[in-house]
């Protein structure tokens, strides 16, 4: 099959087009073979290419986390899918290889049926954001009147979070954004202008507390770094800190410890025993996306056919911060 493969040459990582990469085969009865139609490019793919810590979760020399495609073959025990079904998924390191290839073999438990209303290119931009958001919200198990602060709400996960929070009945939300465009995008997701705070304000901590008339029951961090200190200081004693980034500072950790806070970690690529949740979540999301609800759909920038050249172009756009908030996608033909 065709694939874009990661290789190391003279100590540097490179991407090459491989026309004769071994096509994966179904080895377990609950697996399916997916013919890939579109893939999305994520920051974690760039980080793996750069050889950063994320390489620890690599299971193949083919990168790629998100894809959409058509089932070409099924194992004997596959119950919910058949040949010809259009699907989407976040493959992570849970498949035979990454997404940047013609085919991938995965367990049916991480698959979801693609909404008919959306193209392969559009739907492939959504799995990671919504799996992450749904995991976070479904585990809250706190009163719907709880006050929530979302740090870094204008990213794809943050916008998905707002949709999912509203879906589950949470309304008392304050969110941070960086500019007028981000603010307008959050308003499109259902927030009021007074629910949005610019994180660039010099007196941010005070303003965040003023917006809520006090400390928050829940803080959800989508950004990491220094902002986790703001989140920790804004949380009530014994409050819930939901960590999506695993990038808390030492000071934030100290504050959370002093407050006896509960810390909930949301892992995008968790242990195999949790894989069954992914397909279940995406099928829930798929049913909502196909209904009348106006849920967040990230804009996409189609860079053409999957190739090492176009994938390199995508990485360059990410490094130069020129994606303009769009998810970069590639067709697989």
Image: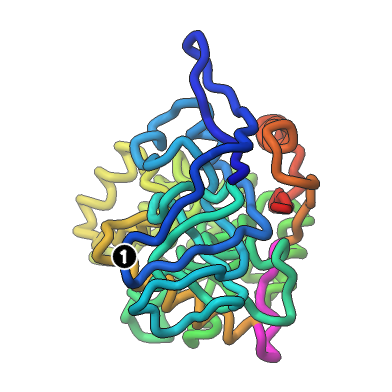
**Res 55 seen here:** yes
Colouring convention used in this rendered image of the protein: rainbow
What crowding class fits label 1: few (fewer than 14 Cα within 10 Å), some (14-19), or many (20 or more)?
some
Q: Nearer the viewer, residue 70 or 254?
A: 70
Say whether residue 306 is left or right of residue 236. Answer: right
Q: Percent from the top left, x then y, of residue 113?
A: 56, 78
Residue drawn at x 59%, y 78% is 85
**Res 211 seen here:** no
User: Which residue is farthest top?
Assistant: 10
Q: Is residue 19 above or below residue 122?
A: above
Q: Percent from the top left, x then y, of residue 296?
A: 67, 71
Residue drawn at x 58%, y 72% is 87
Does residue 33 show up magenta in the picture? Answer: no
> Circle 1 sits on which residue?
28
Q: Percent from the top left, x then y, of residue 307?
A: 70, 38
Q: Magenta region, mostly helix, strand or loop? A: loop
Say whether residue 168 is left or right of residue 175. Answer: left
Q: Nearer the viewer, residue 284 or 304?
A: 304
Q: Nearer the viewer, residue 54 or 160?
A: 54
Q: Quadrant of residue 289?
A: bottom right
Q: Secondary structure at mark 1?
A: loop
Does residue 294 show up magenta in the picture? Answer: yes
Looking at the rendering, the stretch of residues picked out in magenta corresponds to 290-298
Q: Percent from the top left, x then y, of residue 213?
A: 48, 71
């Amino acid at each position: 099959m065709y694939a874009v493969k990661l290789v190391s040459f003279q100590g540097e990582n490179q991407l090459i087009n491989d026309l004769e990469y071994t096509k994966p085969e179904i080895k377990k009865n609950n697996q399916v073979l997916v013919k890939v139609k579109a893939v999305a490019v994520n920051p974690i793919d760039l980080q793996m290419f750069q050889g950063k810590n994320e390489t620890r979760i690599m299971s193949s020399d083919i990168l790629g986390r998100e894809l959409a495609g058509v089932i070409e073959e099924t194992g004997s025990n596959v119950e919910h899918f058949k040949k010809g079904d259009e699907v989407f998924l976040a493959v992570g390191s849970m498949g035979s290889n990454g997404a940047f290839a013609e085919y991938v073999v995965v367990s049916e438990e991480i698959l979801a049926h693609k909404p008919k209303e959306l193209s392969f290119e559009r739907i492939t931009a959504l799995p990671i954001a919504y799996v992450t958001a749904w995991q976070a919200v479904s585990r809250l198990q706190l009163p719907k009147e709880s006050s929530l602060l979302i740090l870094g709400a204008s990213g794809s996960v943050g916008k998905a979070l707002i949709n999912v929070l509203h879906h589950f009945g949470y309304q008392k939300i304050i969110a941070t954004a960086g500019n007028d465009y981000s603010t307008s995008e959050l308003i499109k997701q259902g927030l009021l202008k007074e629910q949005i705070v610019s994180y660039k304000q010099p007196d941010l901590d005070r303003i965040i507390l003023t917006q809520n008339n006090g400390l928050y029951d829940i803080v959800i961090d989508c950004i990491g770094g220094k902002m986790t200190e703001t989140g920790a200081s804004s949380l009530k004693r014994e409050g819930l800190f939901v960590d999506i980034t695993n990038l808390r500072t030492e000071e934030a950790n100290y504050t959370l410890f002093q407050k006896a806070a509960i810390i909930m970690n949301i892992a995008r690529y968790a242990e195999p025993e949790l894989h069954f949740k992914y397909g279940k979540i995406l099928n829930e999301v798929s049913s909502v996306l196909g209904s009348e609800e106006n849920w967040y759909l990230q804009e996409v920038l189609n860079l053409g056919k999957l190739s090492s050249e176009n994938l390199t172009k995508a990485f360059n756009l990410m490094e130069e911060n020129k994606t303009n908030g769009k998810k970069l996608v590639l067709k697989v033909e």
